[in-house]
Image (cartoon, helix red, strand yellow):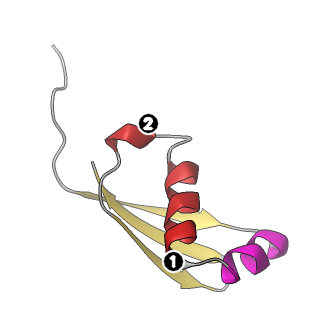
Amino acid sequence: MQLTQIKGVLVATVVMDEHEAAALGGMSERDLLRAVKRTVGSVIPEHLIRDVMVGRSGNVLEVAFSL
């Protein structure tokens, strides 16, 4: 048996330390999305990640993405 396709949206919570939160606060939207995609890519291969949406509350990022 082989998994060939996943459809839908996945949501991940990313917690940052104060230094990371300050660095992300100064990033452009494009750079922020790139950094988040790289972080999620540590668990799911980046080439599989398509659309990414990010919400931020303090030092917590809620990341929604599709594969």
Which label belongs to residue 19? none
Residue 60, how many percent across, how many down?
61, 75
Give residue 66's position: percent from left, percent from top: 27, 55
**Farthest right residue in view:** 19
Mark 1 crowdedness (10 Å alpha carbons): few <14, some 14-19, many ≥20: few
Query: What secondary structure characterizes most of the magenta part?
Result: helix
User: The residue under label 2 is which amino acid type?
Assistant: Pro
Height in image: 14 above or below 57? above
Residue 23 lies in the magenta-colored region: yes
Q: Quadrant of the N terminus?
A: top left
> Magenta stretch: residue 35 in it?
no
Residue at x-position 19% and y-position 41%: 6
Name the image quarter holding residue 26: bottom right
Vertical placement of 21 versus 57: above or below? above
Relative horizontal placement of residue 24, taking residue 61 as reference (left or right) = right
- Residue assigned mark 2: 45
Residue 19, given in percent of the width and then of the height, sits at: 84, 72
Q: Is residue 62 left or right of residue 58?
A: left
Amino acid type of the residue that numbered disc 1 sits on in the rendered structure? Glu
Residue found at x 71% / y 68%: 16
**Mark 1 / mark 2, whichever is N-terminal:** 1
| Residue pointed to by mark 1 | 29
Classify residue 46 as left or right of residue 28.
left
Give how far across and how far down residue 51 sits, in percent.
30, 61
Q: CA distance from mark 1 to mark 2?
A: 21 Å
Residue found at x 66% / y 86%: 58
Q: Nearer the viewer, residue 10 or 21?
A: 21
